[in-house]
Image: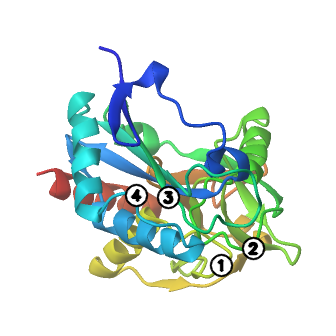
Amino acid sequence: MSRIAYVNGQYVPHLSAAVHIEDRGYQFSDGVYEVIAIHHGKLIDMDGHMERLTRSLSELEIAWPVGPRSLDMIIRQVIRRNRIRDGIVYLQITRGVAPRNHAYPAHHDSALVVTAKRFPPFDFDAANKGVDVITTPEIRWQRRDIKTVSLLGNCMAKEKAARAGAYEAWFVEDDGMVTEGTASNAWIVTAEGKLVTRNTSNSILNGITRLSVLKIAGEYGVEFVERAFSLEEAKSAKEAFVSSTTSFVKPVLHIDGDPVGDGKVGALSAKLLAYYGEHMKAQAA
């Protein structure tokens, strides 16, 4: 079955889906996006994604292309038309088409694209085997709290990780502090067993899975703190892991080739992965 995409009011074959060459998302990365997991036919953490989308649009002064309720219906229709049971839905909103000019147009009609992609059901056993990460200098802009489509710095770092045989790259600021991964939030577990992740600011994207993990940690009595941590602290940590919509919770075994803890999946990381699995199952029930 051929894939179906939604583009500015029409459901079209994915292969022929297109936008105007003067769409500001294409010319200026003037747009935002969300990626939402689909588990057993249900959208995971949908409310959180919509809240973040609302914030991103507001920060960039981009108008909603359709109302939130209509967008929800479009998303579910794209999932239905593509017969997705497990996978992701991707939605992108740009400032739309306007003559090329760096300044915002006086008036704009926002553009909306929604696609869905099938993935195999998430393999929690495979995820529990752990991954490696490398580090790279933080070179991106100063509004990383907005989920913008401007991702070239992330792409460069992800390519660096791929060439090194690593799953992810963590960005490190000039002062040695870790911000986040190219497509994930970064976490460590201290020698005392405390869970640590970077506090929210314009330095990181406030991941929806990050928020869910913090909530789950609180529910299960796991002590945590939101603060910056250094690369040195991460390399001497008891455990580390990454979280994202597509990674869920993935334990980190090595950072820049150095083992984290004993170089094996940590007990707390494994527990949080299992707890997050229950969180997903509850939403899909």
Point out the tag, 3 or 4, that comes first from the N-terminus. 4
* Residue 32 in view of the camera: yes
Q: Which labelled disc corresponds to residue 243? A: 3
Vertical order, 28 against 124 (above or below): below
Q: Earlier in the sequence, mark 2 or mark 4?
A: 4
Residue that badge 4 annotates: 65
Q: Residues within 10 Å of mark 2 (few under 14, many from 20)?
A: few
Q: Look at 67% across and 66% down and name the residue there.
A: 104
Disc 2 marks a residue whose amino acid type is Gln
Name the front one of labels 2 and 4: 4
Query: In the picture, which quadrant includes the N terminus?
Result: top left
Q: Are marks 2 and 3 in contact (CB under 8 Å)?
A: no
Report which residue position mark 1 lands on.
Answer: 202
Query: Do the numbered discs 1 and 2 sit on residues whose CB atoms are within 8 Å?
Result: yes
Foreground pick, 186 / 98 = 98
Sequence-wise, the earlier of marks 1 and 2 is 2
Front one among 86 and 110: 110
Q: Which residue is mark 2?
A: 142
- Which amino acid, by three-letter code, is at mark 3? Ser
At which x and y percent is residue 70?
24, 56
Q: Residue at x 29, y 60 (%)?
A: 46
Alpha carbon separation for disc pair 2 and 4: 26 Å
